[in-house]
Image: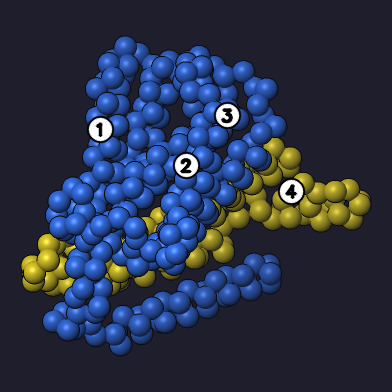
Chain colours: A blue, B yellow
Amino acid sequence: MTHERFRTLLAACIVVVFVALIGMMVALSNPDPVDSNRYLALNVEETGASNRVAGIYLNYRLLDTLLEVLVFSVAVLGVRHYLQHSEGIQLSSLSESEVVQTAVSFLTPLALLLCAFFAIFGHISPGGGFAAGVIAASGLLYVAIAHGMKAMEARLNPWRLARIEKAILLILLAFVLAPIALGKSPLSDLLPKGTPGELLSGGSILIYNVLIGMKVFLGAWLVIAAFAQHRGEL
Amino acid sequence: MGTTIAIILFGMGVLGLVLRRDLVIKLLALGLVNGASILFLVSIGDRAGAKAPIQLVGETAIVADPLPQALVLSAIVVNFAILALALVFVMILVERYHTTDSTRVEQEVTREIDEEKTPCL
C-alpha cells in the first residue's frame, strides 16, 4: 500500500512540476507579432516555397526531417521484425457487405487523388509528404476492410513493398548527398528556387514531398499489414 | 485557451501513464500526452487574427508562427513510431504472460529471472 501511495505522490509531483514549468514558460514569453522572427521575415524569399511550414521542415531543417524519416523506417522495421514469427497464420477472407464495397470503390480513388495532390502541391498549399502518405494508406485500409486482408495480400506482396520502401529511403539519402559530388555542401539545394506560388518552385521541396509521401504510404501500410497478418484479419 | 487545455490533457496523460496498471491504457495515456504537446505547440504559435502560414513574397498579413507547426510534424511521426512499436512489445508480453497488468508482468519476469530462465525480449 505504501508503494502505491508513493507512486501516486510521485505522479502528482511530476504533474505539478511540469504544469508549473509550462505555465511559467507561457506566462513569461511575450511574442511580438510585429517584430517577427527570421523565419517569418525571410522564409518565402529564401526557400521559394509559399507554404512556410514546408519551407522550414524541408529546407532549413532538412536534416531533422531526414532523421524523422529514419525513425519512421526503424519503427516499421521493428514492427515487422517482432511480428515476423506469426507469418504462418492463415489470413481470413472475411469481406464486408456490398454496400461497404461500393462505398469503398468511391472513397479509395478519392484518397489516392488527395494523396497525390497533397504530395505534389505540398509546397504551395496545405499538405506535405507525411499527410499524403497517411491518407493513401488509409485509402488502402478501406479496401482491406471491404474485401478482406487475404485479397489485399494476394495483390500487394509485403516483401516487395518493404523492398520498395527501403529503395525510396536510399533514393532520399542519395538526393541529399548528391550536392557533395558537385562540390557543394550536403543538404544544399540543387534545383532553382523559382517564383513562390508556382508549381515548379521551392527547389527540391516538391521532390522531397513526393518521396516522403511514397515512403510514409508504404511504411504505414506495412505496419497495418503486419498487425493484420499477426491477427489473421483486420 | 489552447495552452490551458493542452496543459490539463498533459497532466491527465502523465497521471494515467504512472498510475494505471494496464499496459494498453498506459499506451493510450502516452498518446494523450503526445496529443497535448502537439496542441500546446500549435497554440503557442498562434496569434490574434493570424492566418495560415501560406503566403507569397511581399504579403504582409499576420500569419501563425510556422516554426512550432514544423516541429509538430516530427512529433506526430515519432508518436506514430513509438505507439506502433510499443504496441508490438505489449502484444509479445501478453502472448507470453497472458496479462496486460504491468505489476503482474513485472512479478512474472522477476520470478523467471530468479528461476534463471531467460525472460522474453
- Residue under circle 2? A168
- Residue under circle 4? B121
Front-most of residues A156 and B104: A156
- Residue under circle 3? A159
Up the image or down, A25 lies above or below A73; here it is below
Amino acid type assigned to the residue bearing label 1 in the image: Leu
Residue A48 position, x and y percent, is: 21, 61
Mark 2 and 1 residues: CB-CB less than 8 Å, in contact? no
Disc 3 to disc 4, C-alpha distance: 24 Å
Farthest residue in the front direction?
A182
Amino acid type assigned to the residue bearing label 4 in the image: Leu
- Is residue A90 visible in the rendered image? The answer is yes
Residue depicted at x 53% and y 24%: A157
Q: Are marks 3 and 2 on the same chain?
A: yes
Q: Element under label 1? A: helix
Disc 2 to disc 1, C-alpha distance: 20 Å
Q: Element under label 2? A: helix
- Badge 1 or badge 3: first in the primary sequence: 1
The image quadrant of residue A51 is bottom left
Disc 2 to disc 4, C-alpha distance: 30 Å
